[in-house]
Image (cartoon, rainbow, N blue to C red):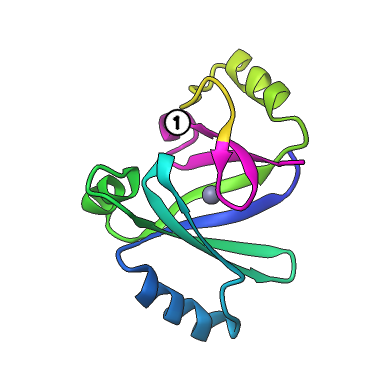
Amino acid sequence: MEKIEHIGIAVRSLEQANSVYEKLMGIAPYKSEAVESEGVVTSFFRSGPNKIELLEASNPDSPIAKFIEKRGEGIHHIAFSVTDIRSEMARLREAGFTLLNTEPKFGADNKLVCFVHPRDTTGVLIELCQERE
Ligand code: ZN
């Protein structure tokens, strides 16, 4: 694994959260994107090498809706960038981690992603992401 690629934050209202993070970071989001398959709408802020992803549920069955129902708004996942997601997935599977998807899938911000179950990672959902060509 390489650096932390971004930190994902679950929010009730993207519009409200955007204005909070615009004030906090002094910049506007560089991207807003819906990921239908995940039931989320996202926006991304970049400050130097650091990125924040805000996630709002786009339907009541979205994992983000469930997360907020259970735990309220807050940090939802930490994403690590990897150069070869398939080999990282194999390595983690071998090491006993539960992967939430068997194949890499298309995530936001032009990435291939895979999630690791938080029960194996001290309660934190981990995302692997590889830049798509
Ligand atoms: Zn993410």
Q: Quadrant of the N terminus?
A: top right
Tell whether position 59 is magenta: no
The residue depicted at 61 percent of the width and 53 percent of the height is: 109
Examine the image and state in which quarter residue 11 appears: bottom left
The residue depicted at 64 percent of the width and 44 percent of the height is: 111
Q: Percent x, y for residue 117?
A: 45, 31
Q: Report the front residue among 108 and 12.
A: 108
Q: Is mark 1 within 8 Å of ligand 1?
A: no
Q: Quadrant of the C terminus?
A: top right
Vertical arrangement, residue 100 with respect to residue 129, above or below: above
Q: Report the front residue among 87 and 58.
A: 58
Disc 1: which residue: 117
Q: Report the front residue among 80 and 129.
A: 129
Q: Is residue 49 left or right of residue 24?
A: right
The residue depicted at 48 percent of the width and 22 percent of the height is: 98
Q: Residues within 10 Å of mark 1 (few under 14, many from 20)?
A: some
Tell whether position 119 is magenta: yes
Vertical arrangement, residue 46 with respect to residue 75, above or below: below
Q: Percent x, y for residue 104?
A: 59, 28
Examine the image and state in which quarter residue 91 appears: top right
Q: Percent x, y for residue 99?
A: 50, 24
Dot 1 amino acid type: His
Q: Which residues are magenta?
A: 106-133
